[in-house]
Amino acid sequence: MKVVLENLTKRYQSGNKKNGGEVLAVRDFNYEIPDGKLVGLLGPSGCGKSTTLNLICGLENPTEGKIYFGEDDVTDLPPENRGVGMVFQNYALYPHLTVKQNILFPLQNLKGKDRPTKEEMNEKALEAARLVQLEELMDRKPKELSGGQQQRVAIARALVKRPRVLLLDEPLSNLDARLRLQTREEIRRIQRETGITTVFVTHDQEEAMSISDEIVVMQAGVVQQIGKPQTVYDDPKNLFVAKFLGTPSINLFDGKIQSGKLMIGEEAVMDVALSDRKVTVGIRPEGFVLFDGGAMSCKLLRVEVMGRDVSIVSSHPACQADQLRSIILSENKVDEEAETVRFDLKPGKVFLFDIESGDRIEVEAHA
C-alpha cells in the first residue's frame, strides 16, 4: 500500500500568549511512500517527524494538504477506519493482561461483520506472536518480559489486524544498546516478511540508516532530503543533512577558494573549479588519508585504537570545533609521539557549503 502525502501542512496556535501567532510543525510535505517499503522519518527533537506520523495515522488533522492510501483519500477518515497499526515509544501494554490478551485486544474491539470468531481471533493472535517470536510467552504478563519482548508484543498487537500501514513512533528509545540493536533487526525482519508499508520515526540516524529502504531527513517541519540512506550520506544536499548523518560526525572547517585551490587555513588541500569565495568545508572522518607528505597538517592530540580502525584525534586552527576525528585502518602506523600529523583528502568525502545558506556547492574536486 503506497502512502501519498500531498502538500501536507500542520499549524498549531502558539502556546506563548505574549508573542501569539502560530507554530508551523509540518510545512508543505510532499512524498510518495513506496508500497511495501520501510521509510525512516529522521530528524532532531521538534522537527515535525512525530506530527507527520500522527497525521498519517489520523490522530492529528492537517491544516492543509491531502493523505492518500493507495488511491483512497483518507485525509478526513478517523484512525480506526484507516487500517493502520501504531506502535508507540512506551509500548502502551495493559499490565493486567497476558501477552495473548494484549495481542487479542484490537480484535475484540471490532464490531459487527468485521469481528472475527473466537477461533479466528486465537489463530490470528498466534500467527502474530509467531511473527515476533513470542509464541512461547503467551501466558506471561508484561512485567515478566524484557523491554525488547514488550516492544515485540506491541508490534504483534499492531499487526494482528493486518493493517495496510504500520507506524512506529520512536519504538526503540526505551531499550538499552544491545536490545536496540536486536529489536531493530527484528523490526526489519518482520517488515520484510509481511511486506507492510512501514513508517519508522527516530532521532537516531544509525537506526534509520540501518533498516530503512529510504530516509526522510527533516528540520523545523521542512523536508531537507529524501533518498536511500547511503545516497543521502554520500551526497548531502545541505550542511544540516551532512552534520546530522554520520558517526562520528562530519568535521567542519572555515575555508576559501583561492585561484582554483581549496584553502583550509594557509594550506591548499585540493584543486577545485570554482570562483574565489569563502566556504564551509565538511570532511567525513573516513575522508583522511594518512601520509607524511600530505597537503593538510593537524596538531596530534591522541590516537584511539578501535580494533579494525584507528581514530586520530587532532586539532586545526580552521576547524569549527576544538578537535577533529580522522578514521583510518588499523594497518596504518601512527607515531603517537609526533606533534603533528599530515593527511591527504579523499575528494568524494569532502563537501563544500555556502556559508550563508548552508546549501551544498557542487564541484568537481581533485586532490
Image (cartoon, grey):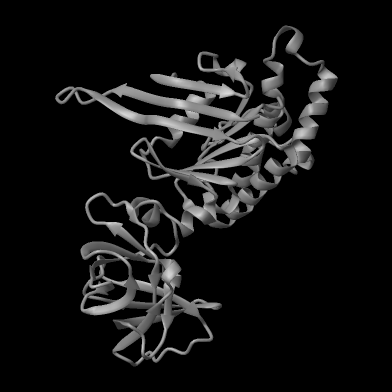
Q: Locate residue 153 relative to residue 232 in the image: left or right.
A: right
Judged from this view, the residue extending furthest toward the top is: 112
Residue 163: image x %, image y %? 67, 26
**Viewer-side residue, 57 vs 131:** 57
Q: Locate residue 27 relative to residue 107 in the image: left or right.
A: left
Q: Does the image show residue 10? A: yes
Q: Does the image show residue 60? A: no
Examine the image and state in which quarter residue 88 appears.
top right
Residue at (79, 16) in percent of width and height: 116
Taking 192 as reference, is 242 above or below it? below
Taking 253 as reference, is 220 above or below it? above
Residue 359: image x %, image y %? 32, 51
Taking 273 as reference, is 328 above or below it? below
Residue at (82, 15) in percent of width and height: 117
Residue 356: image x %, image y %? 22, 52
Is the C terminus in the top left, top right, bottom left or bottom right quadrant? bottom left
